[in-house]
Amino acid sequence: MKKIIFRLPLLIVSIVLLQNRAVAQAAGSSKPFRHIVIITFKPGAPPDSIKALDKVYAGLAKSPLVKDFEWGVNVSARDTASNKHIYNTTFASKEDMESYRKIPEYKRLFQLSLPIADEVNVVDYTINK
């Protein structure tokens, strides 16, 4: 009987520690997720329309779901014939990106880009370091 009374608290502590470890591992298993959009604009696309699109992306980047955001204009010497903007957004997880897509302002990206975009390329991936 003494052995059972002594071992029972030890068993309970062990179970609690193992459960906490499993929860911590599950919470840390989500890797950052990157979403890259490259838009090639139609020749003659109005600069004001392009700036409006840039502004919507920058506004969406203020969402708490976004961990990092940067954008820029392609300046590659290999591709001087077109105007391309690159929008690079990082999320804590793929699930956060899915939630980001539900933000009402997100739909404006399509309303603004479709009339002026010649080509849109999207790359999504889990970040491995």
Image: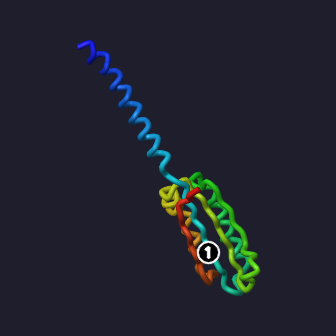
Q: Residue furthest top?
A: 2
Name which residue type carries label 1.
Answer: Leu
Q: Which residue is mark 1?
A: 112
Q: In this rendering, would 65 be left or right of 8?
A: right
- Nearest the eye: 106 or 89: 89
Instruction: From the top left corner, tell me how far across and down residue 40 is, in percent.
Output: 65, 80
Q: Residue furthest left?
A: 1
Instruction: From the top left corner, tell me how far across and down residue 118 is, in percent.
Output: 62, 84
At a point 63% along the width and 74% down the height, the residue shown is 38
Up-down relation of residue 45 to residue 71 (above or below): below
Instruction: From the top left corner, tell me how far across and down residue 63 is, in percent.
Output: 60, 55
Up-down relation of residue 4 to residue 56 (above or below): above
Instruction: Examine the image and state in which quarter residue 58 appears.
Output: bottom right
Secondary structure under tag 1 reads helix
Up-down relation of residue 39 to residue 10 (above or below): below
Q: Residue furthest front?
A: 3
Q: In this rendering, would 7 be left or right of 127?
A: left
Which quadrant is home to the C terminus? bottom right
Q: How many marks?
A: 1
Instruction: Examine the image and state in which quarter residue 52 appears.
Output: bottom right
At a point 61% along the width and 62% down the height, the residue shown is 89
Query: Would you call the spot at circle 1 few (<14 residues within 10 Å), some (14-19), or many (20 or more)?
Result: some
At a point 56% along the width and 72% down the height, the residue shown is 122
- Nearest the eye: 27 or 54: 27
Instruction: From the top left corner, tell me how far across and down residue 12 is, in percent.
Output: 34, 26
- Nearest the eye: 70 or 47: 70
Which quadrant is home to the N terminus? top left
Q: In this rendering, would 84 be left or right of 37?
A: right
